[in-house]
């Protein structure tokens, strides 16, 4: 079913853009818009020499997407520059992760990407020092309220988001990559000590860890809704890193060492399924050892197939909703112990209720 | 190419009708008959395309549920662009449509430098009227449009980065409060106006259809030659204040919605306008006076 | 432009205006990395007279502004 999706076909084979009619284009551009992949389409069209052959109107729409992506990347790169300036004199590692790292490293998966915030990783004992440097340089905390502030400090894996008033890019300072309560939470010191220097005190994760982080973010931490973009990111990272023949064994060793074998299995399975990622059979067999039981596998398939591209025609909106929210519950479940989860969700629900009843009062 | 009214109405209530204004094609669907009436009245002279056409934006005006459709009708809006509009009562539905389209252009369009400005043209002279809200730029642009100028926009000046030309984007003029009776008197023909929407967050709002010729020529660009920053003050003495080129440049930057996104090409384009156009600030106390000052400045300064 | 220099910073995407004085300082720094004292020596060479205190303060203020705009950065040792 998902195989029929046109956007997916084009991502795999950009020259298929040349065979689209007006209706096809509308469908592809719509999906790409919702999944934040228009910038990527524009990039593919340029680099594959297809640009001039596209309908003018498509060029116009993709130019907007391209400029938008370039602007966001310029802002991110500039923010990295400003963070480096703010942390001048801080001696330890400041590790860029996610979008900012891909851009700084000039990776394929950064092409056309539209990140709007920056994530950095530092050791836990440096958290206060780094926060202080940033505050002194004019950043301010986007703290919402006492409860959230407390929640961040106690349970989250990051500081409450910081932002410089002149630039409005959110900077998230993490001390680990998963919530401390998550059973997958890795020995973060291993990742930090393997980080590679980029410039001054700015570092990047090693290739293996960079990919693992992306995988964990999608299959353990995040919601899987509309995350074709994240899967594509993993596909790109795999494709780019595995040019080095030694990559796969390093990567699989590392996955097992950090206890990420299960999410890695999911990543490889779905990358291959959706994007035909080139993964050696040997690696696949090794990854399968960490596959879940048959029933869990089937359930996961069912949910992921449904939600990876949720806007396709002819699918029931209700089943999509249930599948998506099933995955949301699931990722929350992994993040927190059950009692805490219940508390957190009730509070969230309660707050939403309060907000909606107060707006109702205002409008009546 | 263009469709008859009944087909447009059918499309509006279903999958959406394809409205074309300047370089932009929007698929609009409206689930409320009363809002469809208002919409079709103000967009009467505009081209609706038969399609299929490649679509820039999708705008869906709907009711969240049956209660909001029939018992306490309320208009929800989906621009597919991260908006968070507060639903309006059905009687103000047209405002939702217009705000939605503004939002989509303001955040989606990067092929053109967008100025928060009115734009008009006469004898091949493109005039940009950048201003903050409340300076009377809508009234001044519309006043000029119904005084022999060709209307491009009262809200979104669009400069094509490739050609350095202004593109028409002649959406209906949005008039507020005191400017409504002023324009009604100026234009004369009441049929060209929408209903007056009272009690909106911005007071009373009324829309005005641009002259038919401006809509007909919505694909004909012009080179910018004059920039006039209007300041409306009902007690002030009329005044024309010249601007230095640096001031002219930074004022253009400030009035542009997407300058920062477009980056270097926008820098060069605005520097070129600041360098080549004649620029000034005018202070005026009535529409007639504003128009007189515009003409005076152009006659005295345009080579 | 007629009364100021306008520059576009391709990294930050910001446009900045500078007067002639700031522009001189910017050109000196753009030439090679230097200290505050180096800039003052260069300016004295250009103006062919010692800088009065007011101008020295002006230089310092300009440098702080440049740093805020991200046009310059501190080196390892300061």
Image: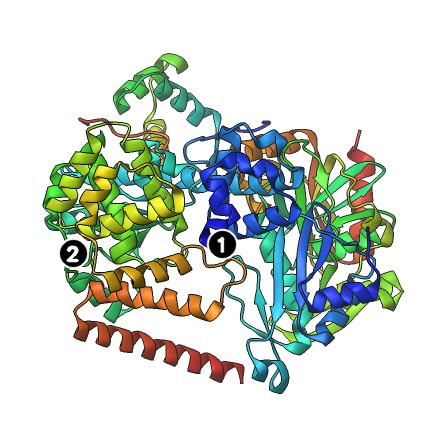
Specify whether A299 is left or right of C76: right
Q: Against B259, is B64 above or below?
A: below
Q: Circle 2 marks a residue in which chain?
A: A
Q: Is residue A251 above or below residue A264?
A: above
Tell which of B182 and C36 is nearer to you: B182
Same subunit: marks 2 and 1: yes
SS at mark 2 in the image: loop
How many neighbours does mark 2 have within 10 angstroms: few (below 14), some (14-19), or many (20 or more)?
many
Q: In the image, which disc is placed on residue B149?
A: none
| B216 left or right of A82 in image | right
Q: Is residue C59 above or below residue A20?
A: above
**Location of residue B48 in the rendering, given as x and y in whole percent from the top left corner:** 77, 56
The answer to whether residue A176 is visible is: no
Query: Residue A220: x, y in percent?
Result: 25, 56
Give B191 or A214, whichever is nearer the viewer. A214
Q: Which residue is mark 2?
A: A184
Residue A269: in sight, yes or no? Answer: yes
Give the residue number, with chain letter if any, for mark 1.
A34
Left or right for B45, reference B69: right
Residue A265 position, x and y percent, is: 24, 49
Name the residue at 22% across, 39% down: A283
Badge 2 or badge 1: first in the primary sequence: 1
| Residue drawn at (16%, 64%) of the image | A154
Q: Secondary structure at mark 1?
A: helix
Location of residue B300 in the rendering, given as x and y in whole percent from the top left corner: 81, 35
């Amino acid at each position: 079913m998902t195989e029929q999706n046109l956007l997916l076909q084009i991502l795999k084979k950009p020259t298929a853009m040349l065979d689209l009619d007006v209706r096809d284009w509308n469908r592809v551009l719509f999906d790409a818009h919702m999944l934040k992949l228009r910038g990527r389409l524009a990039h593919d069209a340029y680099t594959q020499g297809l640009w001039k052959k596209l309908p003018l109107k498509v060029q116009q729409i993709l130019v907007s997407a391209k400029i938008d992506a370039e602007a966001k990347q310029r802002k991110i790169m500039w923010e990295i520059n400003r963070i480096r300036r703010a942390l001048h004199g801080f001696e330890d590692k400041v590790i860029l992760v996610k979008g900012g790292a891909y851009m700084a490293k000039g990776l394929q998966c950064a092409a056309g990407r539209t990140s709007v915030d920056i994530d950095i990783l530092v050791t836990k004992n440096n958290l206060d020092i780094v926060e202080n440097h940033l505050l002194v340089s004019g950043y301010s905390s986007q703290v919402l309220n006492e409860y959230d502030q407390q929640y961040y400090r106690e349970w989250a894996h990051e500081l409450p988001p910081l932002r410089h008033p002149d630039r409005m890019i959110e900077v998230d300072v993490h001390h680990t990559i998963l919530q401390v309560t998550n059973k997958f939470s890795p020995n973060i010191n291993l990742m930090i000590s393997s980080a590679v220097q980029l410039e001054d005190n700015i570092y990047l994760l090693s290739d293996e860890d960079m990919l693992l982080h992306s995988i964990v973010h999608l299959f353990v931490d995040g919601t899987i809704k509309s995350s074709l973009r994240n899967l594509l990111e993993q596909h790109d990272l795999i494709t780019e890193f595995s040019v080095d023949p030694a990559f796969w064994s390093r990567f699989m060793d590392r996955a097992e060492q950090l206890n990420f074998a299960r999410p890695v299995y999911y990543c490889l399975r779905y990358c291959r399924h959706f994007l035909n990622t080139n993964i050696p059979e040997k690696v696949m067999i090794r990854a399968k050892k960490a596959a879940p039981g048959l029933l869990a596998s089937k359930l996961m398939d069912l949910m992921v197939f449904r939600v990876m591209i949720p806007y396709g025609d002819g699918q029931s909106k209700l089943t999509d909703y249930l599948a998506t929210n099933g995955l949301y519950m699931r990722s929350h479940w992994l993040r927190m112990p059950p009692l805490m989860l219940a508390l957190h969700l009730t509070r969230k629900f309660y707050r939403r209720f309060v907000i909606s009843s107060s707006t109702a009062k205002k409008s009546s | 190419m263009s469709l008859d009214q009944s087909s447009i109405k059918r499309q509006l209530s279903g999958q959406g009708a394809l409205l074309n204004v300047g370089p932009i094609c929007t698929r609009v669907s409206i689930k409320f008959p009363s809002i469809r009436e208002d919409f079709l009245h103000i967009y009467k002279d505009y081209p609706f395309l038969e399609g299929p056409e490649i679509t820039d934006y999708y705008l869906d005006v709907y009711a969240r549920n049956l209660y909001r459709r029939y018992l306490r009708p309320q208009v929800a809006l989906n621009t597919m662009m991260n908006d968070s509009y507060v639903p309006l009562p059905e009687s103000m539905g047209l405002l939702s449509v217009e705000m939605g389209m503004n939002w989509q252009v303001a955040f989606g369009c990067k092929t053109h430098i967008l100025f928060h400005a009115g734009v008009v043209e006469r004898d091949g002279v493109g005039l940009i009227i950048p201003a903050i809200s409340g300076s009377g730029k809508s009234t001044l642009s519309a006043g000029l449009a119904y005084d022999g100028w060709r209307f491009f926009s009262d809200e979104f000046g669009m400069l094509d980065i490739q050609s350095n030309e202004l593109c028409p984007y002649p959406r209906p003029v949005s008039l507020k409060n005191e400017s409504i009776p002023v324009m009604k008197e100026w234009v004369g023909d009441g049929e060209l106006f929408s209903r007056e929407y009272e009690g909106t967050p911005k007071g009373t709002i009324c829309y005005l259809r641009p002259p038919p010729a401006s809509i007909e020529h919505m694909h004909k660009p012009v080179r910018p030659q004059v920039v006039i920053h209007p300041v409306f003050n009902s007690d002030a003495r009329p005044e024309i204040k010249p601007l230095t080129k640096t001031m002219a440049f930074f004022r253009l930057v400030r009035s542009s919605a997407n300058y920062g996104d477009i980056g270097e090409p926008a820098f060069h384009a605005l520097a070129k306008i600041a360098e080549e156009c004649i620029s000034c600030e005018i202070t005026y106390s009535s529409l007639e006076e504003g128009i007189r000052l515009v003409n005076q400045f152009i006659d005295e300064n345009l080579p | 432009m007629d009364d100021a220099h306008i520059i576009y910073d391709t990294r930050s995407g910001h446009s900045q205006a500078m007067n002639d004085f700031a522009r001189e300082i910017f050109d000196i720094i753009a030439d090679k990395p230097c200290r505050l004292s180096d800039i003052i020596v260069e300016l004295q060479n250009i103006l062919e007279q010692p800088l009065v205190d007011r101008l020295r303060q002006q230089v310092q203020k300009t440098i702080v502004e440049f740093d805020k705009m991200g046009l310059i950065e501190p080196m390892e040792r300061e």
